[in-house]
Image (spheres, grey):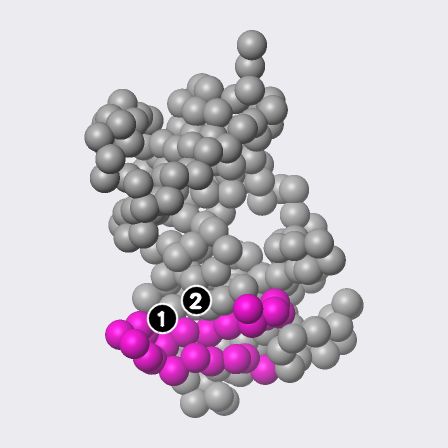
Amino acid sequence: MALTKRATAWLATLSRETPMPTAEVERLILTAGSTPHAAWLDFHDKYAGYIEEVGPGDIAIWGLARSASASPPSRWFKPDSVSLVPPEYGFPEAIRCADVHPVHGYELGADGAFRGIGGPADSFEMKIERHGVMKEFYDRGKVTQTLLTRKSDEPQHQKLLSDMAHALVPEASDKAAKFYLEPKRLLRFNPFIKQLVLLELDVP
């Protein structure tokens, strides 16, 4: 799916290196004994080379593989190769991000589902959309956050969900996480862990 303007605006804040050609990545996947799934190649073709800051001094370099001549050199995964994850726990085969600390769980399933910061999400585009929603809201002014863990069943929180249902952001929402955006409020709801995170503009 095409990215929204807010997602494109967030993506534009990232720097990007020259990526390894997709055809070369396809060859590496075949050499590793796997199938170059369409979702994998599409992801690499669109997003390889983008550099995301995932923490202080900590980056994720998007894509599925990097060249040994890339600069900065790969830190976590061997260059000129792919890192595959076999099917397990009911999840399909996955492939790891070109270079990122394994603790961040940056993996893309054969079905296109993404695990990692901004996920789990049905697609990598959805991860980008979620960052776009957050950027747009924080750009509006000073924000305060309230974390309501395992309290979504309480009547007042069910009312909050009901009141903000009209503001659902479909492109950023799936079964694992739902985002609701109003002019002065942003609500993130994680149904599986019954967690609500409410962000509000700190205005007089």
Q: Nearer the viewer, residue 110 or 91?
A: 91
The residue drawn where x is 73% and y is 58% is: 57
Q: Magenta stretch: residue 65 in it? A: no
Helix, strand or loop at mark 1:
loop
Secondary structure beneath disc 2?
strand
Query: What residue is at 48 percent from the left and 25 percent from the top?
Result: 200
What number is the disc on residue 136?
A: none
Tell me the magenta residue range: 81-103
Label 1: how many residues lie within 10 Å, few (<14), some (14-19) or many (20+)? some
Q: Is residue 84 visible?
A: yes
Marks 1 and 2 sit apart, C-alpha to C-alpha, by 7 Å
Nearer to us in this view, 163 or 173: 163
- Whether residue 96 is in magenta: the answer is yes
**Residue holding disc 2:** 108
Task: Point out the image quarter for the C terminus.
Answer: top right
Up-down relation of residue 50 to residue 12 (above or below): below
Give the dominant element type of the magenta stretch: helix, strand or loop.
Answer: loop
Horizontal arrangement in the rendering, residue 59 relative to residue 121 (left or right)? right
Mark 2 is surrounded, within 10 Å at the Cα level, by few (under 14), some (14 to 19) or many (20 or more) other residues, namely many
Q: Which one is nearer the viewer's eye here, 67 or 133?
A: 133
Q: Report if residue 161 is visible in the image.
A: no
Name the residue: 61% across, 69% down.
101
Relative placement, left or right, of 186 versus 158 is right
Q: Is residue 181 above or below residue 21?
A: above
Which quadrant would residue 142 be assigned to in this image?
top right
Residue 70 occupies quadrant? bottom right
Measuring from the top left, give residue 36's x and y in whole percent: 42, 76
The reply, left or right, for residue 75 in relation to residue 6 is right
Q: Amino acid at mark 1?
A: Ala
Q: Position of residue 97 (x, y in %)?
A: 54, 68
Residue 110 numbered mark, or none: 1
Say which amino acid is labelled 2. Leu
